[in-house]
Structure formats: C-alpha cells, structure tokens
Image: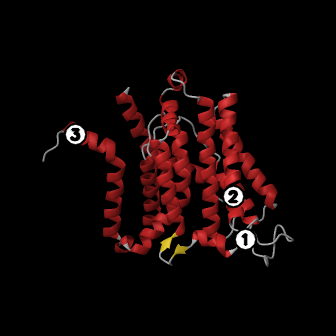
C-alpha cells in the first residue's frame, strides 16, 4: 500500500503526537532497556495521573476558548483542607485536636466541594462580568493560594489516615490507585464531551460563541459548568496528591496549571477554540511524563527538562496555528 503526500500529511496531522510518543518510547527503550519494565511503565502513568486529571478539565476549558490558571492553587487549597479532615488521632500537629477521626469520604467531599466552588466562581465571573478568563483565573490563582497559606499558617498538613493515603497506593500491591482513578475520569470526561449536550455546547461555544447563542445555547450557564468541572477535577487531583505524598504543603502544586495546559495543548486541543479531545489530553500528559522519566533514567540535568518542555509547548502551539491557518 502506498500513500501520496496529501494522505501522509493527513496522517501526521491526525496522529502526529501519537507518532511522536511512539518514537520517544522506542528511542528510550533502546538507550535504556529498563524503560519498558512494568514497574517503570506504572511509574510513568502514576506520575502523569495528577496533572493528567487536571488536564482533562483543562481540555473542556480550552475547547471553549478559555484558560484556567488557578488549578494548581486550587489543588493546594483543597488539599490542605481535605488533609486537615483526614489526620490520625495521634497527629502531633492536629488541626482539629478534639475532632474524632472522620470517614475518608469527608475529606474527599471537602476537596471536591472546594475545587468545584472555586471553579464555579471562575465561571461565574467570566460568564456574568465578561472579564477575560486569563484575568479571572489569575485572580483565583492568587486567592486560592492565599487561603491555603492562611488556613495552614504556612505549615504542611501531614499524619494522614491510612484510608486516605491508600488512594495514593497500589491495589493488590500491583496497580497504582491514582492510575485507576485517572482512567475512570478519562472515561467519564470522554462521555461528557462526546455523548452529552454539555459536551456539544462546549464545542459550539469554542467554535463560534455568537452562533452558539443564536442556536439557543445558554452560553453563561455552560461556561459556569465548564469551569466548575475543571475545578472539580482539581479537587479530585488534590485527593490523589494527598494520597501519594501523605502530606500537603500550602505551596504544593506550584506550576501544575502550566503542566496541565501543556498536556492539553500538546495533545492537540486548539487555543483557537472548538477543537480538542480527551484522548489527546491523555497522550499529551504521557508525552511529558515519558520525557521527564526518560531524562531521569538518563541522568540528564533537571533544568534541561524545563527547556525541553518549553520547546515542546511552543512547537505544539506553532503546529496548531499552522493547522488553523490552513483550515481558515
């Protein structure tokens, strides 16, 4: 079977990032055979689970032609509050000394409520006051981080109950629980984006907000829902983070919002709006995790990792702009 230039270009346009990921895996497995071990594969998936969950929510936001810079700070705020409800009775610095050990569902709900509420505020400000998403979420970034510091007085929250840390452990001592949660949310997010009116409205708003309004889409309501869902996933990521680290510092997840945005962008979600997939966000997060893992195995200086990530992000945006220019 032969392919002409047009077909080859279409294949690279559609599956380019997957091809890049496959080439990275092949190259790293040749240079470092330990890369393809089951332990390392699970390690890569676990590393990508936290910012990958956040990237799923970010996909909805960017498809709608928005941005959310607050998710890292929201994770920290939700994480310290949830952890304060999930400390063991004998914790040396217990935030609520007279409170009995609570069921694990309480800190989980606390994180989800805080994340969802912060997202709701973002969406409400953007939808009702018409201020740019960049400004609204930048404000929430600072506010949420400030509340995290105020709540903890700048101290980490540790000594978490086993039921909470188990969420960062392994099922049957084999499968990482964060990966299970991540895959469940990939499925849920994919159904929401592709099989519901909410998902269709998200694409419509990002494609042409005026046309969406004319066709009867309640734009304000859907924008609020989009940012609320993004915040909700930041809250879920906070629980996974707390489970993995067994301690949450108010300065945690600094820069995670940029990694989530990078994962979504690398995965092909267009900042011009109306284009993007959950699968693309998953592959984008994998590309960053494989890159980081490969650098670690090869003993490359961590500072060069930042340079490489920046180049990949810029390259992804350039490719996105060229594709959109051709489409227009």
Label 2 sits on a secondary structure element that is helix
Q: Is residue 48 above or below residue 281?
A: below
Q: Residues within 10 Å of mark 2 (few under 14, many from 20)?
A: some
Residue, disc 2: 109
Mark closer to the chain start, 3 or 1: 3
Quarter residue 293 falls in: bottom left
Q: Secondary structure at mark 1?
A: loop
**Along the line of sight, which residue is nearer the eye, 29 or 193?**
193
Judging by the rendered image, the residue that carries numbered circle 1 is 158
Looking at the rendered image, the disc whose residue lies closer to the viewer, 2 or 1, is 2
Q: Position of residue 177 (x, y in %)?
A: 53, 68
Q: Residue furthest left?
A: 1
Q: Visible in this render: residue 147?
A: yes
Mark 3 vs mark 2: which is more N-terminal?
Answer: 3
Label number found at residue 7? 3
Q: Residue at x 43, y 61 (%)?
A: 290
Labels 2 and 1 touching (C-beta < 8 A): no
Residue 68 picture quarter:
top right
């Amino acid at each position: 079977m032969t392919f002409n230039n047009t077909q080859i270009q279409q294949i690279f346009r559609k599956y380019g990032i997957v091809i890049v990921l496959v080439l990275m895996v092949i190259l790293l497995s040749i240079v470092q055979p330990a890369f393809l071990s089951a332990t390392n594969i699970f390690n890569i998936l676990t590393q990508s689970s936290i910012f990958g969950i956040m990237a799923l929510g970010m996909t909805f936001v960017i498809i709608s032609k928005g941005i959310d810079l607050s998710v890292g700070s929201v994770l920290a705020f939700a994480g310290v509050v949830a952890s304060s409800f999930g400390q063991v009775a004998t914790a040396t610095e217990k935030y609520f000394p007279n409170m009995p050990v609570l069921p694990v569902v309480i800190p989980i709900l606390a994180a989800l409520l805080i994340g969802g509420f912060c997202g709701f505020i973002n969406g409400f400000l953007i939808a009702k006051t018409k201020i740019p998403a960049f400004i609204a979420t930048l404000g929430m970034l600072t506010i949420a981080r400030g509340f995290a510091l105020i709540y903890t007085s700048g101290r980490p929250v540790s000594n978490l109950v086993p039921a909470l840390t188990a969420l960062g452990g392994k099922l049957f001592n084999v499968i990482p629980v964060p990966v299970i949660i991540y895959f469940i949310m990939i499925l849920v997010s994919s159904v929401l984006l592709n099989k519901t009116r909410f998902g269709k409205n998200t694409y419509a708003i990002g494609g042409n907000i005026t046309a969406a309004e004319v066709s009867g889409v309640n734009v304000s309501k859907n924008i609020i829902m989009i940012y609320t869902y993004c915040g909700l996933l930041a809250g879920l990521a906070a629980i996974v983070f707390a489970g993995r680290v067994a301690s949450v510092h108010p300065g945690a997840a600094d820069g995670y919002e940029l990694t989530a945005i990078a994962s979504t962008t690398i995965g092909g979600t267009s900042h011009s709006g109306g284009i993007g997939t959950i699968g693309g966000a998953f592959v984008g997060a994998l590309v960053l995790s494989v890159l980081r893992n490969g650098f670690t195995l090869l003993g490359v200086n961590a500072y060069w990792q930042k340079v490489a990530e920046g180049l990949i992000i810029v390259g992804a945006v350039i490719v996105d702009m060229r594709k959109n220019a051709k489409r227009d």
